[in-house]
Amino acid sequence: MSLNIIVMAKQVPDTRNVGKDAMKEDGTINRAALPAIFNPEDLNALEQALRLKDKYPGTKVTILTMGPARAAEIIREGMYRGADNGIVLSDRAFAGADTLATSYALATAVKKIGDFDLILGGRQAIDGDTAQTGPATASFLNIPQITLADSVDIQDGWVVCTRVLESRSERVRAKLPALVTVCKEINTPRYPTLPNIMKANRKPITVWAAADIDADTNETGMPGSPSSTKKVFEPEKRGTDTVYFIGSVEEMAAQLVDMLENERLI
Ligand code: FAD
């Protein structure tokens, strides 16, 4: 059995390394001042695709990203780790997209790719943090979706996953073709290898504009985005009062109980 896997990956500003130039005066992110990286959980999605490729020889892994031209950097990085191909959706018509317009563009590109069994993505991007893009893309494609997966395998035409929830795990399956978003606990991404680097440097990266995927430009970029950011601000810090109890353990316990009773907390 071999699979065609598409990995949705986003190039994001490295928010773990924020300097003083990172924010503009209007509170929006100054992307130019931040190093750009492969969204961490998308590396986990890629690693999972590569593990399926190791298990099922003949499997093809294609990375799909939407962003400015420099987003091709993560495709190259993905190829260094073992991906076969990469496609960048880059066009002014995609700029200013919210999650709905992003998902529409990604789903339209997937339709153009045509032949796929499984789409893997990260649970969320570290800049937007909405975790909406995976589910919305599956919805545009009208295929089943599984979110928050910490294991992914294929059995008899189904994708079988474990989902990590707060107090329990779930084992679920979906008929292929399907979309799965993974969380960081699923695996440890492999490093690039020299043979992959040499092979990847000879490979072209496909760049598609809106017209290449027959996207309706009323549904992409700003025209296709029903949400807009009104204001970005830091929430006011709430002050906390520290209360110290003095005395023996029994006296301090009694004072604590009195306080909780007075506050009607017990
Ligand atoms: P999540 O939904 O948290 O991502 C989940 C997963 O989906 C990722 O792990 C990845 O697998 C996949 N994914 C997400 N985005 C992509 C992508 N682009 N390509 C491939 N896979 C992806 N951002 C800009 O850079 N420029 C703008 O001008 C801009 N304008 C915006 C305007 C509005 C009104 C809003 C609301 C957002 C705007 N954004 C802009 C942010 C951008 O739309 C989101 O970053 C994007 O839609 C993805 O959402 P997210 O970051 O929350 O990703």
Image (tube, rainbow, N blue to C red):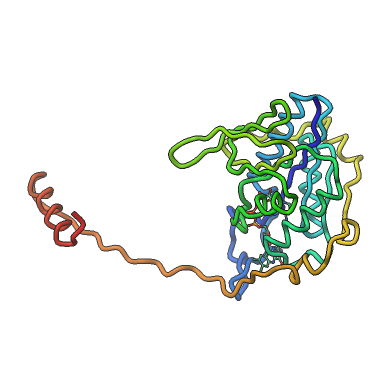
Q: Residue at x 71, y 29 (%)?
A: 51
Along the line of sight, which residue is nearer the eye, 226 or 150? 226
Along the line of sight, which residue is nearer the eye, 3 or 7? 3
Quarter of the image for residue 47 reads top right
The quarter of the picture where the C terminus appears is bottom left
Ligand 1 falls in which quarter? bottom right
Where residue 12 sits: x, y (%)? Answer: 68, 55
**Vertical position of residue 204 compared to residue 195: above or below:** below
Q: Is residue 61 visible?
A: yes
Where residue 87 sits: x, y (%)? Answer: 84, 49
Along the line of sight, which residue is nearer the eye, 181 or 80? 181
Quarter of the image for residue 263 reads bottom left
Q: Residue at x 90, y 41 (%)?
A: 203
**Vertical position of residue 15 compared to residue 200: above or below:** below
Q: Is 83 positioned to the left or the right of 250 in the image?
A: right
The quarter of the picture where the N terminus appears is top right
Where residue 212 sits: x, y (%)? Answer: 90, 57
Q: Is residue 187 visible?
A: no
**Vertical position of residue 235 compared to residue 179: above or below:** below
